[in-house]
C-alpha cells in the first residue's frame, strides 16, 4: 500500500512539474514576443534563447528567433533559425518565404548544376512533411489499410469486395511509398548534418590546423554539409563539392 502511494505521489509530481514547465515556456515565449513587438530585439533574443537552452523547440520559437536576428543584422543566425523552423514545419509559407528572402541577402552564391526534374520532384516530396509529419501520415495510411481489410472481410456483395481489393492495392502502394519516404528522412535526420555559417567571414583550411593553407573563404548565412569533425574543427562540404575545415565557432548545426 505504501509503495502504491509513493508511485502516485511521484506521478503527481511529474505531472505537476510538466504543467508548470509548459506554463513557464508559454510565458517566456509570450515575453519574447512582447519584446519583439516593442522592437527590443536583443531582449527578445535573450528570452527566446533561454527557451532553446532548456530544450524547448517549436516552429514559432525558431521563426521568431530568425526574425529577431535578422532585425539586428545577424544574417547567419537568421538563416540558422529559419532553417530550424523549416525543419519542423517544411510546408509553412511564412517560414519558407522568410528563408528564401534572407538567402537572397547572403554574399555567397554557390553555382550548382540544376537537378534532373525527377530528382527535384522527389526532394519536394521528401520535404512535404517533417519526420513527425510523415510518421503520422504513415500511421494514418496503415489504419486505413486495416479498415479496408475489415471492410473486405465483412462485405456481402461482390462489387464491394472488388472495390475494396482495388482500394487495398492502392493503399498498399501508398503505404510502401510513405514508409520509404519516412525511412529516407529518418536516415537523413540521423546521418546527414547541415550547418550554417554564423560569422561574417570564415576561412576554411585544407586540414584541421591553423597553419594549413586556405581552402576557400565563405560568409555568414551559407548552408554547408558537415562531413566530419576533429577536436574543435569541423569538415564541411559546399554545394559545388569544395571541402574544407572550419573551427566550431564559425558554424552552427541546424
Image (tube, helix red, strand yellow):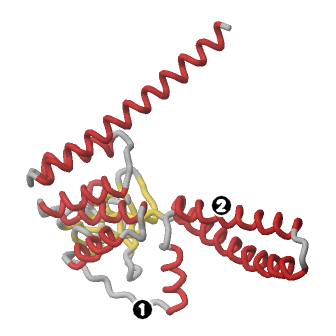
Q: Residue at x 13, y 62 (%)?
A: 71
Q: Would you say 67 lies left or right of 150 here?
A: left
**Secondary structure type for disc 2:** helix
Q: For mark 2, what is the residue?
A: 139
**Which residue is at 15% across, 53% downward?**
36
In terms of depth relative to the viewer, which is nearer, 16 or 89?
A: 16
Nearer the observer, 254 or 43: 43
Q: Is 144 displayed left or right of 108 in the figure?
A: right
What residue is disc 1 on? 114
Q: Position of residue 119 (x, y in %)?
A: 53, 86
Q: Is 35 placed above or below 74 here?
A: above
Q: Local crowd at mark 2 within 10 Å, few (<14), some, or many (≥20)?
A: some
Q: Nearer the viewer, residue 154 or 230?
A: 154
**Mark 1 and mark 2 in contact (Cβ < 8 Å)?**
no
Residue 190 visible within the image: yes
Q: Residue furthest front?
A: 157
The circle drawn on residue 81 is: none
Badge 1 element: loop
**Can residue 187 be seen here?**
no
Q: Which percent across, then down, holds residue 12? A: 51, 22
Image position of 43 (left or right of 176): left
Cα gap from disc 2 to disc 1, whole angstroms = 34 Å
The x, y position of residue 174, in whole percent, is 68, 75
Q: Quadrant of the C terminus?
A: bottom left
Question: Can you tell which quarter of the image residue 246 is in?
Answer: bottom left
Quarter of the picture holding the N terminus = top right
Estimate how packed mark 1 is, as few (under 14), some (14 to 19) or many (20 or more) residues with alpha carbons within 10 Å. few
Task: Mark 2 or mark 1: name the one nearer the start of the chain.
Answer: 1
Question: Is 165 left, or right, of 252 in this rendering?
Answer: right
Residue at image point 41% right, 32% down: 19
Amino acid at each position: 500500500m505504501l509503495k502504491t502511494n509513493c508511485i502516485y505521489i511521484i506521478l503527481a509530481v511529474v505531472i505537476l512539474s510538466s504543467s508548470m514547465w509548459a506554463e513557464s515556456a508559454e510565458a517566456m515565449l509570450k515575453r519574447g514576443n512582447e519584446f519583439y513587438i516593442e522592437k527590443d530585439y536583443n531582449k527578445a533574443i535573450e528570452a527566446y534563447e533561454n527557451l532553446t537552452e532548456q530544450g524547448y523547440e517549436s516552429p514559432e520559437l525558431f521563426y521568431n528567433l530568425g526574425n529577431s536576428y535578422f532585425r539586428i543584422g545577424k544574417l547567419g543566425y537568421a538563416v540558422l533559425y529559419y532553417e530550424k523552423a523549416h525543419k519542423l514545419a517544411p510546408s509553412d509559407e511564412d517560414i519558407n518565404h522568410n528563408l528564401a528572402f534572407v538567402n537572397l541577402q547572403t554574399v555567397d552564391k554557390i553555382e550548382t548544376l540544376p537537378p534532373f526534374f525527377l530528382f527535384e520532384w522527389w526532394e519536394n516530396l521528401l520535404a512535404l512533411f517533417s519526420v513527425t509529419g510523415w510518421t503520422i501520415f504513415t500511421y494514418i495510411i496503415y489504419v486505413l489499410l486495416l479498415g479496408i481489410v475489415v471492410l473486405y472481410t465483412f462485405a456481402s456483395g461482390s462489387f464491394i469486395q472488388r472495390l475494396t481489393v482495388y482500394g487495398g492495392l492502392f493503399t498498399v502502394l501508398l503505404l510502401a511509398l510513405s514508409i520509404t519516404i519516412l525511412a529516407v528522412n529518418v536516415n537523413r535526420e540521423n546521418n546527414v548534418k547541415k550547418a550554417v555559417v554564423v560569422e561574417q567571414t570564415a576561412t576554411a583550411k585544407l586540414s584541421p590546423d591553423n597553419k594549413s593553407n586556405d581552402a576557400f573563404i565563405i560568409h555568414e548565412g551559407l548552408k554547408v554539409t558537415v562531413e566530419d569533425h576533429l577536436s574543435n574543427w569541423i569538415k564541411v562540404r559546399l554545394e559545388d563539392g569544395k571541402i574544407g575545415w572550419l573551427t566550431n565557432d564559425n558554424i552552427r548545426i541546424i
